Image (cartoon, rainbow, N blue to C red):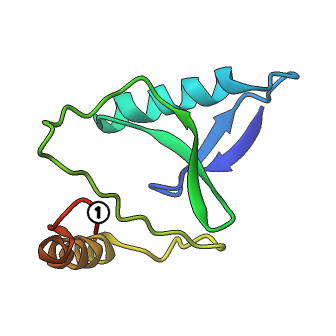
Amino acid sequence: MREEECPRCGRLLRVPRSRGVTGAAPIQRALALVREQLRVDVTFVSEIVDGREVVRHAGDGSLRTSTSTRMYLFVLSSRKRRPDLEAADVEFVRSVAASLCGHLAGPADG
């Protein structure tokens, strides 16, 4: 067993060590766990390659949208851990994302 800090609450978690398990199965299990625990529709792991996002692993969830519905992701990333982020920071990001909605609506060809 190894210990890791929970990114959400800072509590130490005991995580079993992988015994040579590689590939998609552990990633799919982790994505399913996150989806279930946080009650979200979709989880995925993506990678930035040559300036473009490439989805490498997607969980089993789906977002039901009509043909006239668009979905945008507002993603934040940092090279360093940010344990100082708080609920007020989340609200700030939500307000910025909400302010962008009117600018994103428009023809599909941009």
Q: Secondary structure at mark 1?
A: loop
The answer to which image quadrant residue 16 occupies is top right
> Is residue 95 positioned above or below 33 on the image?
below
Q: Amino acid at mark 1?
A: Asp
The residue furthest right is 20
Residue 8 at what x, y percent from top left?
Answer: 45, 55
Residue located 67% across and 48% down the image: 4
Count the labels in the image: 1
**Would you say 7 lies left or right of 39 here?**
right
**Would you say 55 lies left or right of 105 here?**
right
Identify the residue position indicated by label 1 in the image: 109
Residue located 62% across and 68% down the image: 51
Compare residues 32 and 13 and report the one nearer the observer. Answer: 32
Residue 65 at what x, y percent from top left?
Answer: 17, 37
The answer to which image quadrant residue 90 occupies is bottom left
**Quarter of the figure with the C terminus:** bottom left
**Would you say 44 lies left or right of 51 here?**
left
**Quarter of the figure with the N terminus:** top right
Residue located 20% across and 76% down the image: 100
Compare residues 90 and 28 and report the one nearer the observer. Answer: 28
Residue located 21% across and 51% down the image: 70
**Label 1: few (<14), some or many (≥20) within 10 Å?**
few
Residue 36 at what x, y percent from top left?
Answer: 36, 28
Compare residues 36 and 48 and report the one nearer the observer. Answer: 48
